[in-house]
Image (cartoon, grey):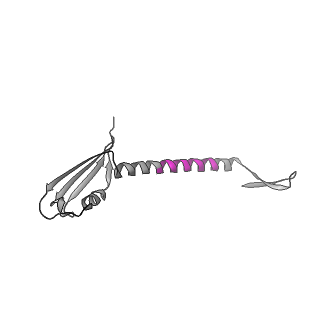
Amino acid sequence: MLWRIDTQKGQAVEEATPAIETMKSISRRIRRLEKSCAAARAMLTARTEEPQKRLRIVYGLLWGTPDLEKSECKRTLNANGLLTEMVGMHGDPDGLADGELDRWITSFPVEELSFAG
């Protein structure tokens, strides 16, 4: 910042320079971009945590003691907002505690698919 003394008022006055104005403009733009990115992250998180449409397919050896270490899961989010969860179970999922299967499935990352057209 540049300061100059206003001789009529007898006080220091802040003086803007082109470089300072450019930096202020850049700072404002960065803040807007950060807000925009934060909003996009929040929207993606909301879409994957509470999707409008969900298709969960559970397949595999659905008898015996459930073994999540041998099981597998793939989650994809389509451009139309459909969250597809393909769960290859090793054992009967009914043998899991309440919510354990959901917690295990949501621990997998969501691959976002887009359609080029």
Residue 40 image point, x, y percent:
44, 48
Looking at this rendering, what residue extends furthest in the right direction?
Answer: 8
Residue 46 image point, x, y percent:
39, 50
**Front in this rendered view, residue 49 or 1:** 49
Residue 107 in which image quadrant: bottom left
Quarter of the image containing the N terminus? Answer: bottom right
Residue 102 in magenta stretch: no
Quarter of the image containing the C terminus? Answer: top left
Q: Residue at x 19, y 55 (%)?
A: 88
Residue 28 vertical placement versus 92 (above, below):
above
Q: Residue at x 29, y 48 (%)?
A: 76
In this rendering, position of residue 30 left or right of residue 17:
left
In this rendering, position of residue 67 left or right of residue 40:
left
Looking at this rendering, what residue extends furthest in the front direction?
Answer: 98
Residue 36 in magenta stretch: yes
**Front in this rendered view, residue 88 or 113:** 88
Q: Residue at x 25, y 53 (%)?
A: 74
Magenta stretch, main secondary structure class: helix
**Front in this rendered view, residue 20 or 32:** 32
In this rendering, position of residue 7 left or right of residue 3:
right
Residue 79 in which image quadrant: top left
Q: Residue at x 39, y 52 (%)?
A: 45
Residue 80 image point, x, y percent:
33, 40
Residue 29 image point, x, y percent:
57, 47
Residue 66 in which image quadrant: bottom left
Looking at this rendering, what residue extends furthest in the top direction?
Answer: 117
**Front in this rendered view, residue 109 or 66:** 66
The span picked out in magenta is 23-38
In this rendering, position of residue 98 left or right of residue 7:
left
Q: How many marks?
A: 0
